Amino acid sequence: MEKKRTDDYEPGPIPSPRPLDRFGFVKQEPNSSPDGLTRGRPAHEYEREEGRVRKWRKMIGVGGSDWKHYVRRKPHVVRRRIRKGIPDCLRGLVWQLISGSRDLLLMNPGVYEQLVIYETSASELDIIRDISRTFPSHVFFQQRHGPGQRSLYNVLKAYSVFDRDVGYVQGMGFLAGLLLLYMSEEDAFWLLVALLKGAVHAPMEGLYLAGLPLVQQYLFQFDHLVREHLPKLGEHFSQEMINPSMYASQWFITVFSYSFPFHLALRVWDVFLYEGVKIVFKVGLALLKYCADDLTKLPFEKLIHALRNFPEDAMDPDTLLPLAYSMKVSKRL
Amino acid sequence: MGSHSKGRNKSYDYSFKILLIGDSGVGKSSLLLSFISNLVHDLSPTIGVDFKVKLLTIGGKRLKLTIWDTAGQERFGTLTSSYYRGSHGIILVYDVTRRETFTNVLDIWAKEVQLYSTNHECIKILLGNKETERAVTREEGLALAQEHKWFFLECSAKTRENVQQCFKDLTLKVLEVPSLLGNGSAVVKRQILAQKKLDPRSSGTGGCCS
């Protein structure tokens, strides 16, 4: 399926536009499949996909009008469907509904524009320096000063003014960038606000405040969870002096949007926005569990390399996420 | 990172821990990538820490360099400070085109080194990266380095000029300090053979200057 798509962009042997995957990322190597989707999908899967979209449309109603009603009546159905993945064509809208950002936007008309146009931020230079380094392989963000880079700058600058204690911290660009691929600037901004200020779940701002208190807390908790769920691996980590700050900081700071395959990041975000940060712990644990047998054999250097370069099969959402859902972490968090 | 199929038996004489620090965007990750893989391409900002291993032979010694690359943004200090401990070499990087990255070497990074580095004899190199439209002269860099008894070098992660040289010089210097060889390199503790002496002011822009 993916092959066919790229053929549209690349007729014959002319090598001019570089091949993109179905999310708009430039492919690293033509024969590798970083998004793990090269396997052709049989026709009945398309039908199933269409069926799912129909169900979702019914569930959310026109422009999301039925959503709250549906969630109140059937929260478990919603959870189950979200865990299977939100249809890509509805993702942007559903993300805004489940994160509470839609309400924030409606309650604060004109605020975003004010922040972008009239305010100045102490972080402007820091933001500018990182703009071209955020999703540099995505077609939307590649053009210097193009619409992608401009909207990314606006969202980050607006946030740094909106919350001057947080300001701008590296990593936030990946959150904003991911959101901008599915919604407008203003919507992305309010979703960022909803997350950091805790519209629905625990506020995330502690991940970015001075001292990164929430990162420290999550890493500490994750360390304990590893020992609890994977005692053998935990023991091996201790012996090799590996701790979660060496590999998991970016999992929490960017909610897996920094260095994981994009199609996996999206599936994690679907669940993250509905269920909260627990899914980050669960996915982290699931990754370790899936690879535990290999990891326990590795010495320090290879270990830390492996913890940043998980095998492709481990990062297949349909393998990893069910495993993640099966991890029990609630007591600890 | 290249795969080393040498199995688990130690294939090196010494293992050194090298740390890269400096302001955000000065090119620490690019330098490391350029040193490790000959590749030069756009990188995302480092979140927290990253890490690479390089095996090389210098002065007849087989060495394993474990190189820790840190996030430059000040906010990440709480995550990166613990990685100074036990370093054999520290590379303080600035961007010769951005003066504030140079002044921050003194205002921020030298202080961090003093606070968190545990090996007092740990070798430090001041490294000016990029070399286009410069805002910091070579002389200024050299003067700052001399004042702190650091080594000094300018390089370019883009053209890869002097990148290998930097890591090589640093490693040679580490090899000259017995206390550094003793701690951390938990490997075959052979006699330190007479090292090929490194002339402090060799080859113009090339070698280290002490």
Image (tube, coloured by chain):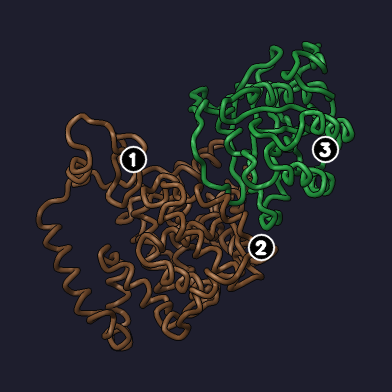
Chain colours: A brown, B green
**Counting other residues with Cα less than 10 Å from the Cα at mark 2, is it few (<14), some (14-19), or many (20 or more)?**
few
Could you give the CA–CA distance between mark 3 and mark 2, rounded to whole angstroms? 36 Å
Q: Is residue A296 above or below residue A224?
A: above
The quarter of the rendered structure image containing the C terminus of chain A is bottom right
What's under tag 3, amino acid-wise?
Answer: Asn
What residue is disc 1 on?
A27
Q: Nearer the viewer, residue A75 or A134?
A: A134
- Chain bearing mark 1: A
Mark carried by residue B119: 3
Q: Secondary structure at mark 2?
A: loop
- Chain bearing mark 2: A
Q: Quadrant of residue A321?
A: bottom left
x, y (%) of residue A319?
32, 54
What's under tag 2, amino acid-wise?
Answer: Ala
What's under tag 1, amino acid-wise?
Answer: Lys
Could you give the CA–CA distance between mark 3 and mark 1, rounded to whole angstroms? 44 Å
Could you give the CA–CA distance between mark 1 and mark 2, rounded to whole angstroms? 36 Å
Q: Is residue A94 above or below residue A11?
A: below
* Residue B88 seen: no
Q: Secondary structure at mark 3?
A: loop
- Residue mark closest to the camera, 1 vs 2: 2
x, y (%) of residue A151?
45, 61
> Which residue is depicted at the point 77% across and 32% down?
B137
**Counting other residues with Cα less than 10 Å from the Cα at mark 3, is it few (<14), some (14-19), or many (20 or more)?**
some
> Which residue is depicted at the point 49% across and 73% down?
A113
- Marks 3 & 2 on one chain: no
What residue is disc 2 on?
A122
